[in-house]
Each structure stands twice: as structure tokens, then as C-alpha cells.
Amino acid sequence: MLPERRAHRAAQVPGRAPPIVHTRGVRTIAVTGMKGGVGKTATAVNLAALAAEAGRRVLVWDLDPQGAATFCFDLRSRLRGGAERLFGGDRDLRAVVKESSIERIDVVPSDVSLRDADVILHGSAKPKRILRRLLSGAGKRYDVAVLDLAPGIGPVTGAVVDVADLLLVPVEPAPLAVRAYDRFAAFAIERTGGPELLAPFLSIVDRRKPLHRRIERELHADPRFLNASVPLSSAVERLADEQTPTVLSAPRSLAAHGYRDLWAEVAERTGLD
Ligand SMILES: Nc1ncnc2c1ncn2[C@@H]1O[C@H](COP(=O)(O)OP(=O)(O)O)[C@@H](O)[C@H]1O
Ligand SMILES: [Mg+2]
């Protein structure tokens, strides 16, 4: 067992985390982690759709310069004023949000200026305060903010970890992915002082593979992991092609079931149920 993993286990309280008590209006759910291509954006897009379906007012904040979430909502990849103004201190998210075609979902689009976001926040004396101020402004108009992050543990991810109510981390059932999760968890625990905000779940599970089945069994016995998992699904592969959340385009697919289970756990953890 990796040393970080042992430390994390020791810090883990038995059982599942209790609902979070909120001091701010908007519940901030960050979809994050060290790895790319593991279903972060697909999760952000689908959970946003489920939250909106449940009657919540949703803000999707695309913080990845790739702009995949922006594209999935069929919006133009343009952040008015760019990253410099957004993180510069005096911006209100209202100045940059775009309405999506889905009722109750607005999006803060990404554009390439976000490639500088890590440098801007790194050079800032108070990155946490900047994000908190932007989100507390959003709290008047939205019930939930779903943040879609680029992979990694740079300054943007660090500041998001500092202010989020839940850190959803998709983990593929593969040894290196679990190891990357452990690294991410150590990073988040160091910043937040405990494992309470971490919500890892299994993503892109291919049950035809014995290794996936074995790791899935092992991780389901691990109380840190959510019960929900999202299977490998051609319906999710089509997400960027159809530019419609899977839970709407293929509501009966196994992946849509997985996202609904995931939303139920996320809503419970964040007091949105
Ligand atoms: N459950 C899934 N089944 C099949 N393909 C998936 C699944 N989740 C994500 N994908 C696909 O894998 C690729 C990477 O997913 P994405 O959500 O963009 O990952 P990330 O945001 O972590 O980089 C995309 O082409 C996406 O459609
Ligand atoms: Mg992504």
C-alpha cells in the first residue's frame, strides 16, 4: 500500500460523510482530479442536467482552457474580458455567464485565455478570496455551481479545493488511476485539513475486463468511494457529438442510471436533495 494511501485511510472517519452545513448560498461542486480523459467533463455536464431537472438553478463554470463543457452545451468558446479580468478582482460572474439551451442552466464559458489562469492566481495574494467572492455573487442567482476543471493540482485547482463544498473525482478502475487519486486526495487533505470534501467514484467502468471488475469490487468496499459508478457507455462517447447531456439524449442508458445514482449521492452530501 502506498504511504499516502495509508495516511489517508488513517484520517478517514468510518462510514459516509454527513450532509454539509452551508454558510454560503451556492453549493459548489468541483469535478476534478489529476487525470485527464476520465470523465470529468461528462460528469459535470450530466450532473448539471440532473440538478436542473430537479428544479435547481445551475451554473456550470468551465475552468478548463480546452472548453469541452462549453462545447457540450453548444456555446461559443469566448470568455468576455478573458481570464485576466475574471480573476483580476472586480469581476462579477453575471458579466460573463451565457444562457444554455437547457432551462435553468447557465454557463461561464471557457476560452484559451484560461491557459494563463494558473499564473494569474499564482501571482495573486488571495486566490481563495477571489474565487469565494465570485461564487458568493453567484449565490444570489444559482443553487448549485458545477465547476469543470482541467486535470492537475495547480493554483486554480488549489483555490477551487479551498472553496468547494464537494470534490468529485472520477477514477478509472486501473492501478495507476487509483494511485493518481491517492496523490490528489493527499493534496486536497493537506489544503482542507481532512478527507470530508472528497467524493471519488468509479468512472468508465468496463465490466468485460476482469481487472476493472476486481478493482471495482475492492473500491466498493472502500468507504471513501461513492456507491455510484458510471460504466463505459457509447451514449457518453456521443456526448460531444450530440452536444446534449447523456441523461437527456439517452435517459435509459446504463450511464444515465449511473449519473442519476451519482446525483442522488451528491445531492445528499451537499444538502440539495
Ligand atoms: N462513461 C463513459 N463511457 C464512455 N466514454 C466516456 C465516458 N465518460 C467519458 N467518456 C469519453 O471519454 C472522453 C474523455 O471524457 P471527458 O469527460 O472529456 O474527460 P475529462 O474531462 O476527465 O478529460 C470523451 O470522449 C468522453 O466522451
Ligand atoms: Mg474535461
Image (spheres, rainbow, N blue to C red):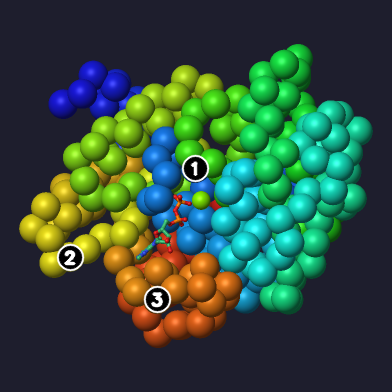
Does the Cβ of the disc 2 residue fall within 8 Å of ligand 1? no
- For badge 3, the amino acid type reads Ala
Corner quadrant of residue 82: top right
| 134 w.r.t. 102: above or below | above
Disc on the earlier residue, 1 or 3: 1
- For badge 1, the amino acid type reads Thr
Does the Cβ of the disc 3 residue fall within 8 Å of ligand 1? yes
| Residue at numbered disc 2 | 207
Instruction: Say which mark, if any, is on residue 2.
Output: none
Residue 130 image point, x, y percent: 78, 30
| 86 w.r.t. 41: above or below | above
Determine the CA span between mark 1 and mark 3.
22 Å
| 58 w.r.t. 10: above or below | below
Corner quadrant of residue 185: top left
| Residue at numbered disc 1 | 32
SS class, disc 2: loop
| Horizontal relation, residue 93 to residue 57: left or right | right
| Horizontal relation, residue 161 to residue 77: left or right | left
SS class, disc 3: helix
Disc on the earlier residue, 1 or 2: 1
**Point 31% across, 54% down: residue:** 202
- For badge 2, the amino acid type reads Arg
Disc on the earlier residue, 3 or 2: 2
Instruction: Say which mark, if any, is on residue 235.
Output: 3
Foreground residue among 22 and 249: 249
**Point 40% across, 84% down: residue:** 252
Determine the CA span between mark 1 and mark 2.
24 Å
Q: Is residue 182 visible?
A: yes
SS class, disc 1: loop
